Amino acid sequence: MSTVLAIDTSTSRTSVALVADGKVLFTKFHDDPIAHGEVLPKLVKEALSISKDIDLVSVGMGPGPFTGLRVGISFAQSFALGLDINWVGVCSLDAMAASINEVEFIVSTDARRKERFWARFKDGKRISDPAVSKASELEKLGVPIFNEGEYFPDPVMLANLALNNNSVEQPIYIRKPDAYPLPAGVKFRVMTALDLVVATAIEKEVYGKAAWSGAQFKEEFAKAPKDAYYLAAEAEGELVAYAGIFFVADVADIHTITVVEKYRRKGVGRELLKRLIDWARVKKADAIMLEMRLGNDAARPLYEQNGFAEVSKRENYYGPGLTAVVMRKELK
Amino acid sequence: MALVLGIETSCDETAVGIVNDRKLLANVISSSVEQHARFGGVVPEVASRAHLEAMQQVIKQALKEASVTLKDIDAIAVTAGPGLIGALLVGVSSASGLALALGKPLYGVNHLSAHIAVDRLDNDAKMQPSVALLVSGGHSSILQVNNLAKDVIVKGATIDDAAGEAFDKIARIMGLGFPGGPVIDKAASDGNKDAILFPRGLTQSADLEEHRYDFSFSGLKTAVSRYLQQTPNYLKADVAASFQEAVVDVLISKSIAACKESGIDNLVIAGGVAANSRLRELAKQRCEMANIALRIPPAGLCTDNGAMVAALGSLAINEGVKPSQTGLSADSAASIAQVIW
């Protein structure tokens, strides 16, 4: 005799089942993408009113939106610890696929950011690792897709799978945390007039005729710290990047984010941008604006990731035929 | 006498403490701070993942340290806010799972009040009424504590940055590292605290009328960054010491004023910044002069830990506070007015 408590919080649905030797004693769910934490204990309490005699906990390990997913796993592990019984982790997509009668198909759940968590099944077995992709990519695979909404991980199936499979010990996150390490060996500090000999040389190299002079920098420095903020990045004792922003009439305007060739694509620009945005927030700016040369838009994805959107184009901004793309990020 | 297990996951420490009424039995902390250092600040998703990974082991270790089993535990307490929501939820869910499995009451408690409650442990001093200075990475306030579980009045708070935040930001500008509190404390130890006179926020007479017990650290931050920009050859130790002095001076002056003006001769200093050595030293000097009994928990219990959560849970039981409902909501922005959920 074995009674399994099954829990899944990998989708917008929180579901719980109590299954004793194939017999379903209790099953219930609640749909709310942000209430797993409140709902799960209530559902389990209800299940416990049917039977307190539990031998095993089965929990959906995802993939799924991280915060909700962890509610189920954290609860299940501690619940098992409290009863001094084992817990078994199951891929939530397997519990979703188990009730679908097709030869070959895909199950997919909402991964947010216009993406889907999914896995492919054939003859009752999963034939791909859980993955995350754009919905349009999935359609190209040409097999039927069963989506979250009509289908959900079934807690009764989850209970059954726990008895016959190896435990998935770690949450199935797939995505890495949205965090970027600071570039190793690069130090960030305030930019001063002492940096200008090197900075003006970098300007000439990077911008040619549009390069700023030392006097132009000094004019901007004079507005700091109240209305302007200039930062320098240094590696091996040398200036390798700098960035500046100034504040005028409720909007902060990014003047420059310049990284020397050798230090590009190492996260230096990302960190400088982050610090400029932080400064604008402290200054309570309504928005941040920047101009970027059309055709020279290697940094465009970085700006877009940080919430900047194109608002207009200015022709001949950088000289004849050189168009500027104006981007804006709202802070309010 | 109740045996309480407390769980704390509001930021980057996964911590479990066990207390028996006012006696500390176990205090186990697993920190993800090293994982965050390379990001220059706590990354919520990184912290939340680390909590889940560490939780089971930390609970088991605490039980071992206290030489008790889960069956002996009378109640579970957990930080329900304020804090990072994803991080809080790992602790609250774990605590809910334990409480339901064990059939024991669950107390969702306020992280800020818990910082003060830790002062109950391993002594039998009468705590109330008292003035409490609560200083941490996210909070800086002066409270009048008539009854920690039931009656806390906010006398003042920061109007911009928290004290701990100011430490983090200045440390970042000076390139000293993260978290800022310990690195500035260390850098300041070789410095002259009187080298640079940095401004003391909200201490002018005009400010005192409206903001008697409030703090402001943004002007200080600006002053320090201006100084650094204008003084290329600055001495790190002197800047650190002078900055630290400006923060500590205001914190203590206003706390002592709050004691005097409310006729309360007990001051408790709590929260992560209470681990700062200069704060502890100056508070001791000034309280002696003012005839105020000063209590500061041991530095190791000032930063986030599970013992403080258990201590507040045990206080709630002693005060006859009802346990929290099943399915309590973690609240990332909870105010100190909500002590027990």
Image: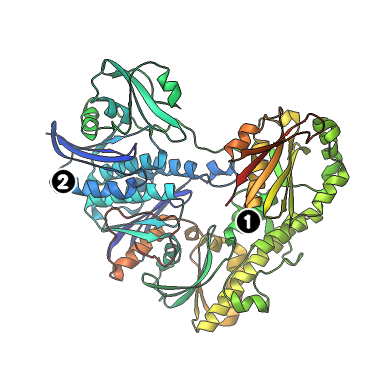
Mark 2, residue position? A52
Q: State whether residue B122 appears in this view.
A: no
Chain on which label 1 sits: A
- Picture quadrant where residue A54 is located: top left
**Circle 2: residue type:** Lys
Query: Above or below — where is B267 with respect to A264?
Result: below
Quick one: label 1 or label 2, which is nearer the N terminus?
Answer: 2
- Picture quadrant where residue A99 is located: top left
Q: How far apart are marks 1 and 2 (CA)?
A: 55 Å
Foreground label between 1 and 2: 1
Chain on which label 2 sits: A
Badge 1: residue crowd in 10 Å (few <14, some 14–19, many ≥20): some
- Picture quadrant where residue B313 is located: bottom left
The reply, left or right, for residue B86 in relation to residue B63 is right
Question: Residue A225 at what x, y percent from top left?
Answer: 74, 56
Question: Residue A209 at what x, y percent from top left?
Answer: 86, 32
Quadrant assignment for the N terminus of chain B: bottom left
Q: Residue at x 67, y 51 (%)?
A: A251
**Circle 1: residue type:** Lys
Mark 1, residue position? A284
Query: Above or below — where is A292 with respect to A250?
Result: above
Q: Residue at x 34, y 34 (%)?
A: A61
Nearest to the observer: residue B228 or residue B4? B228
Question: Residue A34 at what x, y percent from top left?
Answer: 37, 46
| Residue A117: assigned label | none
Q: Residue at x 66, y 51 (%)?
A: A279
Q: State whether residue B325 appears in this view.
A: yes
Badge 2: residue crowd in 10 Å (few <14, some 14–19, many ≥20): few
